[in-house]
Amino acid sequence: MEQLTNLVISDRELAFISTALNKLMNDTNATSVMLIDKSGQVIATQGTGVRRNATSLGALLAGAFSSSRHIAELLGEKDFRTIFQQGVHENIFTTMVEEQWLLVIVFDKLTHIGLVKVLSKKAADEMGHILERVRADTTRTKSSVINVQFRSSVEDTIDLLFRD
Amino acid sequence: MALINIATHEIHCKIVYYGIGYCGKTTNLQYVFKSINPNARGDMLSIATETERTLFFDFLPLDLGMVHGFRTRFHLYTVPGQILYERTRMAVLNGADGIVFVVDSQAEKFEENVQSIAELEMNMRRIGKDLGNFPFIMQWNKRDLPSALPVNVLDRYLNRRRVPHFEAIAYEGKGVFATLRSISKSVMAQL
Amino acid sequence: MVDLKQSLSRFLAIPGVRQAILVGRDGLMIEGLTRDGKEDMEAVGAIMTTSLSTAEALGQEISRGNVVGVLMEFENGLVSVDPLGDFALMVTLSDNASNIGRVRHLVKTIRTEVLEALDIA
């Protein structure tokens, strides 16, 4: 598959994502759920627990996930597509969506991991469909945002903000 | 991979600072963190060993604010430099939109630099990217040290791809922002 | 929240049934209800998954078809393991065998309801 250099997520798709995340959170009674790009960038979150630290969590979880995939390679394993981090009060279940996104579910003792695993598979499949649409849409909608004026304005802002 | 979120009006890009151990990657980020308008940055995250050597990565989120209705964010990362962290570097490189290769200008580090660039080239190929067609610049750091090789020597032997390059003394802040300006613009141009 | 506890409570309504545990085939507990709460439900669920796998291996060995249920009788009680489709098992702990027929019947009855609750139907 040709590597896109970027992904454009429209209003419509973000709404689908939010709905799916919300459903997952309610069905599992999770504390929070997040959808992160594999580069660490946060696409969407639901639930109050993670909002404050979302940026850092995104970077760390993506890093941890990326690490585990390399571990898999070293072990001769094809891939580790999920990670389960078990804490005293809270747990985190992370699963990959089509080599591009990570679905993260934070839950406490009241929810069982078996349930999270089963329900997150369905949610991940749905995210996969959304991702396919996003990929298809991207080439079409990008130019409406990134045009000559935008680039020029951003360069001016860069000069201003990143000055010595 | 740059993320353009039309719904939330945000553009996210990932920039990675690459290079050998102790060449100044973390120092670059620390200087940016210290000097930039506090409104334009978030907390810096450093996953390091007890002796403050980067173990996994440093992370600094920067916010350019609104441009044409879009909030543009740059997330800066550094990789751990020591040889044993090769796989970790690959993990951090994942999804990068731009790379700054930081060079420790000292003569005794030359060989390591050569190896590090070769490793970067290989890692980029592994993730299916062509470094020749990618936002990539070089920083000659530690210009103030006595054994620093002349810039034209470093440029000739390390900058095979003839990418933009900047002199720096990162701990004093010299060249840090010039480097950042260049790589940011390069990343935006590629979007 | 997906209300599996409702479905499981119907097992506890059967006289003599002390625990009802829904376990995934991977051994991880999906939901559990207990009348006295002494035993570690997660452990019971995980161990029973193994026992079902053993039964399946045995079934293949002796060419008697698929496992439709596993019953273990102890001095002080009974454990029944009933497959729920391909993805899960119902594990019930009872005092004795007198109502095992009702347990098995209930497993069949709630199958669709549970699968729907988990969005797998």
Image: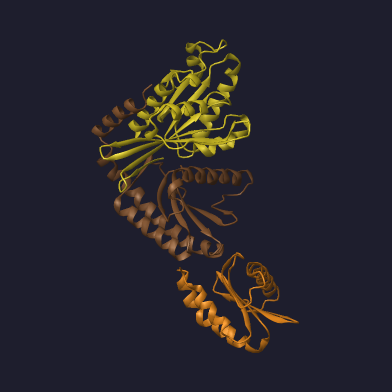
Whether residue C83 is situated above or below residue B34 in the rendered picture: below
Inspect this view and state whether residue B159 appears.
Answer: no
Q: Position of residue B79 (x, y in %)?
A: 53, 33
Tell how many labels. 0
In orange, which chain? C
Whether residue B80 is situated above or below residue A85 in the rendered picture: above
* In front of the other: B51 or A42: B51
Whether residue A154 is situated above or below residue A75 in the rendered picture: above
In this image, B179 relative to B22: left or right? left
Q: Position of residue C38 (x, y in %)?
A: 67, 73
Inspect this view and state whether residue B103 appears.
Answer: yes
| Colouring chosen for the image of the structure | by chain
In brown, which chain? A
Image quarter for residue B145? top right
> What tint does the image give chain B?
yellow
Name the image quarter holding the C terminus of chain A: top left
Give the residue displayed 62% in from the left and 65% down from the top: C27
